[in-house]
Amino acid sequence: MKKLLIIFGSVAAVALLTLLAVSCSKESVKEITTPPAVETTTLVVPALRADGDATVDELRINSVRLLIFRSESISYNGAGVLAVNSYKTGNQSFEESKVPVGKIDIFVVVNEYTNTLSPWKNILDSPNLTEADVKNLAKTWTDALGTTNALPSVNASNPIPMFKSYLGVDLDDQGNMTYNGAPLTTLSVERIFAKVIVNINFDNGGNAVTINSLDVNYVPTVSWLSPTTNNNTSESGFFSVTGIGTAPGTSLTIDPAENLNSGKPNRKYVFYLPEYILVAPSLHTFLVLNAASKAFSIALGDGMGMHDNDYMNSSSATTSDLRISRNTCYIINITSITGEIAISFTVSVNAWGDPTPVPVH
């Protein structure tokens, strides 16, 4: 028997589709001691995966695609066959009448790339689409001309792609769905990027302090729609951006005049990183803050919620510590720059945004 499946995915009502929450970790603090006679630098750097000021562009939904396959896990005929491929824009909802009862695999794709550099839509529109095609969709991080490595841009023309898969869902002839042993009544998606916010905001007591630039190193040149391990162990598979500006994706050097004149630096830097599930800890993504005639290295990754920066920059850090996760916001607050390098973190880890479901009936 075929059963009607209705998914309401209002594109106009952006607030109806944000993010799937992730777990929280409590604070982890490590004191770093230095000889009394040595002038020290203390960077107190809370790094949170929570963003209280998400922009309209970060919430923007321009398109939603619903894909349903006969589950690849079934042992009878029809495994992996595409049953539903519906693409919507504007204020519309899905109403599908060809959903097979039994085990199904569901994919939800939001804001898929349509430009000539990454024509995801061309692939997803294929009548011969397979689950492997969906999982293998990749994005190479280049500028509009495809010639220069560039961080992801987020604006009205470049909304953040979002994705979620539900594999092995049981759909009965009454329209009830079960996923991993629990009723499935809503579908959610995750942004495929991570967001980084660096706040440099403190009173330096009127003393001049020079902040020259903020850089990010070892950004992978490729990422995927579906969470996928990056097996690249060659430096040629990564790029760096020198001089991150206040606008995401820009390359602007911090103006030192403001800091020298006031002694009260107050800057906010926002940029986005592709998800990076790494296999080589030595090739982890990190920030470099060039200030007070020093270069301060801050390793990024999920382990910031549990470990201090010395550990994160050491050979002891694991791939899970150094992973840059999708749907994640890392907030770094720098509250003091005074001299020699010594970094102290107080860290909590939360979600980027609140989960808001897409109702399924």
Image: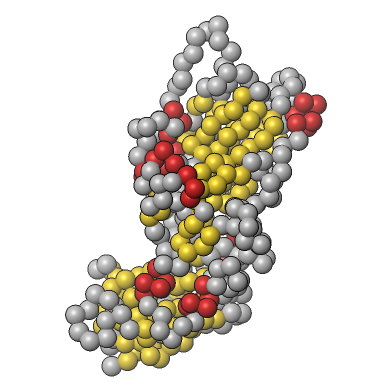
- Residue nearer the viewer, 120 or 149: 149
Does 44 sit above or below residue 137? above
Q: How many marks?
A: 0
- Drawn side of residue 232 relative to residue 202, left or right: left
Colour theme? secondary structure
Q: Tell me if I can see residue 68 in this picture.
A: yes
Task: For the C terminus, give its image quadrant.
Answer: bottom left
Q: Residue furthest bottom?
A: 1
- Residue nearer the viewer, 141 or 17: 141
- Drawn side of residue 304 relative to residue 152, left or right: left
Task: For the N terminus, give its image quadrant.
Answer: bottom left
Residue 188 sits in quarter: bottom left
The spot of residue 326 in percent (x, y) is 47, 55
The spot of residue 350 in percent (x, y) is 46, 47
Q: Tell me if I can see residue 50 in this picture.
A: no
Q: Residue at x 50, y 9 (%)?
A: 35
The spot of residue 222 in percent (x, y) is 49, 57
Q: Residue at x 48, y 50 (%)?
A: 237
Does 247 sit above or below residue 172? above
Does 228 sit above or below residue 111? above
Q: Residue at x 54, y 41 (%)?
A: 217
Q: Residue at x 65, y 43 (%)?
A: 244
The spot of residue 90 in percent (x, y) is 61, 79
Q: Residue furthest top?
A: 37
Does 120 sit above or below residue 335? below
- Residue nearer the viewer, 333 or 174: 333
